[in-house]
Image (cartoon, rainbow, N blue to C red):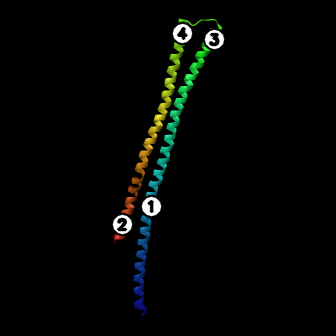
Amino acid sequence: MQAAILPALAGSAATAGAAGTTIFSQLAYGAQAASALMGGVAAFQGAQAEKEAAEVNSYIGRTRAMQTDISHMRGLAGELAEMRSVFGANQQRPNVGTFEVYRELRDARARERRIDFGNRMQESADFRTAARNAGAQARMALPMGLMRAAPSLFDLYQLRMR
């Protein structure tokens, strides 16, 4: 009797071992797929955060450009007022020479103002480009995570179909 039971138990143990291996394989493939999908979600969230930060920096850059422009205009107005008071203190009446000095100062300060304003706006444009690039990365993060999970999902499907 024992001789008849032992082969039956041995067969069922072999089947249970194969089933256990199958379950562990399924879990392993599922874990790999989940890991790849979660990596895609994490990459999406990271890219979204990077996009938002770049958009904020772009806005700040535009604001600083406007502040720089206003600051330069105020500085020019102050310099011209100071020159008028100096000329007045020296009892110099406005004439062609003083107007020429004013014009030269205005031209020089206007050039500086345009350059500074352009540089600040270029910084803002760079951040805006970075925001667009981060948005593109965010759009591709989830499909890339799915693509990385595809081999594990395919292996899991093949294992389940056996």
Decide if residue 95 is on the left or right side of residue 5: right
Alpha carbon distance from label 4 to label 2: 86 Å
Residue 125 locus on image (x, y percent): 46, 35
* Residue type marked 1: Ala
Q: Which residue is mark 3?
A: 86
Upstream in the sequence, badge 3 or badge 1? 1
The residue under the point 54% across, 6% down is 97
Q: Nearer the viewer, residue 153 or 140?
A: 140
Question: What is the CA distance from the residue labelled 2 to the residue labelled 3?
Answer: 88 Å
> Mark 2 is on which residue type?
Tyr
From the image, tell me which residue sits under label 2: 157
Which numbered disc, 4 or 2, marks the residue that appears first in the sequence? 4
Q: Earlier in the sequence, mark 2 or mark 3?
A: 3
Q: Position of residue 60 (x, y in %)?
A: 53, 36
Residue closest to the far bottom = 1
Residue type indicated by callout 4: Phe
Residue 16 higher or lower than 118, as above or below: below
Above or below 141: residue 111: above
The answer to whether 153 appears left or right of 46 in the picture is left
Q: Which one is in front in this view, the residue at disc 3 or the one at disc 1?
A: 3
Q: For the residue carrying disc 4, how many other residues have a C-alpha within 10 Å: few (<14), some (14-19), or many (20+)?
A: few
Determine the residue positioned at 51% across, 37% down.
59
Q: Nearer the viewer, mark 4 or mark 1?
A: 4
Q: Residue at x 43, y 92 (%)?
A: 2
Label 4 belongs to which residue? 99
Question: Tag 1's secondary structure?
Answer: helix
Q: Choose the circle earlier in sequence order: 4 or 1.
A: 1
> Could you tell me how far apart the alpha carbons at marks 2 and 1 are, in whole angstroms?
14 Å
Q: Nearer the viewer, mark 2 or mark 3?
A: 3
Q: Secondary structure at mark 4?
A: helix
Quadrant in the rendering for residue 68: top right
Where does label 1 land, which residue? 34
